């Protein structure tokens, strides 16, 4: 394809910009799969660092601090998208092949950067190649779109044919040559409009019934009549195409960044070698699990563990850059790295986590073996000042949580946890570090992806859920749940087992009672527990008789307090009432 004199300069730049954006976006997406080293943008940035003289490097680090890499990547993007890409668009408008050649050079530079990185593999070339191909395809499409649909004028009516032929001829000679140069500058914008109009009016003008325009060769840009391949500029089609390209470019870049971040964090997570605990958990008694079909197992597997958080996308926190900052009402602010945390004495503890939103009988509860550093151990490094009664913790994604200082410091296993059931915390459960505090609902204690602790006061600070209608403090309420049978089940008459779990974290469950059809309460058998911080399984036999029956459960904690019958919804501080189910027996 030859130079199209009708395409204005801004449109050429736009075509290049969008094609370049698609190339980089698709390359970034491909790099999410091929590995971070294979991103041409990152590789070019790394090469730039290598080529930067030391004083300039130091200046950049001093000026931009931790953001120096981001600034560098932004620099690469600005040079490529602001300088190189528009140039490629201009070349492509002159002749598509030139544009492709420009893209090839631009791709080759990226490729060279990627492949000269230490321990680069052949596979690392793929994102650059795929990106360049996507960019080339986009460029071709946009150039074609900018030129409009190929317009072939239908044969003019006989009376007009002479004149049409004449002006067509004229256009070919004088017009095309002349405007090839002129259109580029001033004429471009103007004829862009004219071309668009002529185009959208169809070939009407050319076919003869379009009024003066078609008939008077002198009044319309001669290039419009240059034969079968009419030069034109279709602004609308270019802009819709460019918009589509921009969406692809941004979408693939964002997706690539997200997936790439996920893969990087996953890779770091599997590399974590968990140190041995200095204080092991009490062994779980064999009789902690009654092994009844349908009854929640004593330990909830990670993949079955409920998940509650405000995060739309799970925060990806790299342990290599993770820090916990402790400040506020402290003697000396402290910053802790992940390695430093792993180097402190670790405590292992079985703790049942519960969500305040859990309805009576609900599923937002799970029991796991956690490994972490006791929070007081860390807080003592900072030195809590008297008068402080709240730890306002913040997660990497900005969620905040207010935990009473006295609860954390009273000797219970309040942890900065790094592991859950023998593996590094799953990312969705707070990797690399989360809080776990026995006895408090999650919203006031269990900050996942925790990065910051402000030691403060409840009368000075408010956590995320407090202004949203939940109470500032949230001790877990004693509760019990029937797991088997399920409400609505149909059973055979005869002896059957009713079983479930009960919890009163950090106090412990002392009794569970069950009644059928509001009759006498009967004591359930209790499974053993390693301590007061976990839920407790229970079961009871029942001679089921034909008919419909209501089954209810209630627990009594180790302080002798029996669960209230009073029904309350979860807000503002936890649901109450007796879990009640109905079954059909035949
Ligand atoms: N960063 C962060 N941590 C959070 C939350 C949150 O929204 N964001 N929700 C809390 C709530 S309400 C609960 S019940 C627990 C749930 O932890 P899980 O998802 O590991 O079960 O996490 C707590 N920690
Ligand atoms: Mo929660």
Image: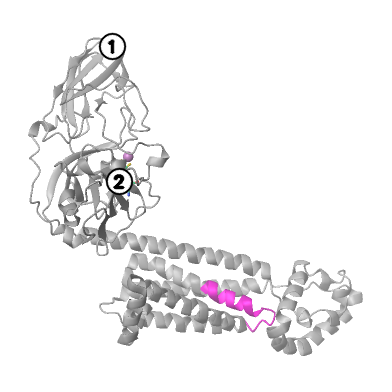
Q: Position of residue 562 (x, y in %)?
A: 22, 21
The label number, if any, that marks residue 298 in the structure image:
none
The reply, left or right, for residue 483 in relation to residue 313 is left
Asked whether residue 10 is drawn in magenta, I would say: yes
Q: Measured along the vertical axis of the image, is residue 540 above or below residue 400? A: above
Task: Pick whichever, 239 or 512, lies toward us.
Answer: 512
Residue 437 visible in rendering: no
Q: Hey, which quadrant is residue 98 in on the image?
A: bottom right
Residue extent of the magenta highlight: 1-19
Q: Secondary structure at mark 1?
A: loop
Q: Measured along the vertical axis of the image, is residue 1 above or below residue 30? A: below
Q: Hey, which quadrant is residue 175 in on the image?
A: bottom right
The reply, left or right, for residue 572 in relation to residue 189 is left
Q: Position of residue 500 (x, y in %)?
A: 22, 26
Cα separation between marks 2 and 1? 46 Å
Q: Which residue lies under the disc numbered 2?
A: 457
Q: Secondary structure at mark 2?
A: loop
The reply, left or right, for residue 296 in relation to residue 175 is left
Q: Which residue lies under the disc numbered 1?
A: 518
Comes first in the chain, label 2 or label 1: 2
Few, some or many C-alpha atoms within 10 Å of disc 1 (few <14, some 14-19, many ≥20)?
few
Q: Measured along the vertical axis of the image, is residue 176 above or below residue 451? A: below
Asked whether residue 73 is drawn in magenta, I would say: no
For the N terminus, the image quarter is: bottom right
**Ligand number 2: quarter of image:** top left
């Amino acid at each position: 394809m030859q130079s199209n004199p009708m395409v204005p300069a801004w449109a050429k730049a736009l075509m290049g910009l969008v094609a370049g954006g698609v190339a980089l976006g698709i390359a970034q997406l491909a790099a999410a799969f091929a590995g971070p080293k294979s991103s041409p943008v990152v590789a070019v940035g790394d090469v730039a660092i290598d080529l930067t003289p030391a004083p300039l490097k130091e200046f950049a680090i001093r000026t931009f601090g931790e953001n120096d890499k981001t600034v560098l990547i932004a620099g690469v993007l600005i040079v490529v998208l602001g300088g190189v890409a528009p140039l490629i668009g201009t070349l492509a408008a002159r002749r598509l092949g030139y544009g492709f050649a420009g893209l090839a050079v631009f791709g080759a530079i990226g490729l060279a950067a990627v492949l000269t990185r230490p321990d680069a593999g052949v596979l690392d070339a793929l994102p650059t190649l795929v990106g360049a191909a996507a960019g080339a395809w986009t460029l071709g499409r946009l150039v074609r779109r900018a030129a409009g649909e190929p317009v072939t004028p239908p044969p003019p009516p006989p009376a007009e044919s002479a004149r049409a032929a004449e002006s067509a001829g004229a256009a070919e000679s004088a017009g095309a040559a002349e405007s090839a140069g002129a259109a580029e500058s001033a004429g471009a914008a103007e004829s862009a409009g004219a071309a668009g109009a002529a185009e959208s009016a169809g070939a009407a003008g050319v076919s003869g019934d379009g009024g003066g325009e078609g008939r008077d060769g002198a009044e319309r840009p001669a290039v419009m009549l240059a034969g079968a391949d009419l030069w034109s500029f279709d602004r609308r089609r270019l802009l819709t195409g460019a918009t589509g390209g921009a969406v692809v470019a941004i979408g693939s870049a964002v997706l690539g960044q997200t997936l790439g971040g996920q893969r990087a964090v996953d890779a770091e997570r599997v590399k974590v070698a968990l140190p041995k605990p200095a204080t092991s958990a009490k062994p779980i008694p064999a009789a902690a699990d009654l092994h009844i079909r349908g009854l929640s197992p004593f330990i909830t597997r990670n993949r079955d563990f409920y998940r509650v958080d405000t995060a739309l996308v799970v925060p990806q926190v790299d342990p290599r850059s993770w820090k916990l900052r402790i400040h506020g009402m402290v003697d000396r602010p402290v910053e802790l790295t992940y390695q430093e945390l792993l180097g402190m004495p670790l405590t292992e503890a079985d703790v049942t986590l519960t969500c305040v939103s859990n309805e009576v009988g609900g599923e937002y509860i799970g029991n796991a073996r956690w490994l972490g550093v006791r929070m007081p151990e860390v807080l003592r490094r900072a030195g809590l000042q008297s008068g402080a009664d709240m730890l306002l913790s913040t997660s990497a994604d900005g969620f905040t949580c207010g935990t009473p200082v006295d609860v954390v410091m009273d000797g219970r296993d309040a942890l900065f946890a790094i592991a859950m059931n023998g593996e590094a915390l799953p990312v969705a459960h707070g990797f690399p570090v989360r809080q776990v505090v026995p006895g408090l609902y999650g919203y006031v204690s269990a900050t996942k992806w925790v990065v910051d602790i402000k030691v403060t006061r409840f009368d000075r600070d408010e956590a995320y859920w407090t202004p949203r209608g939940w109470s500032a403090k949230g001790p877990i309420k004693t509760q019990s749940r029937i797991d088997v049978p399920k409400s609505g089940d149909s059973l055979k008459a005869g002896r059957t087992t009713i079983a479930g779990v009960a919890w009163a974290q950090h106090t412990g469950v002392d009794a569970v009672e069950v009644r059928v059809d509001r009759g006498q309460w009967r004591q359930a058998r209790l499974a053993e527990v390693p301590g007061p911080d976990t839920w407790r399984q229970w079961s009871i036999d029942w001679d089921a008789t034909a008919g419909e029956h209501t089954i209810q459960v209630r627990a009594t904690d180790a302080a002798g307090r029996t669960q209230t019958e009073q029904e309350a919804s979860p807000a503002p501080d936890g649901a109450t009432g007796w879990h009640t189910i109905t079954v059909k027996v035949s």
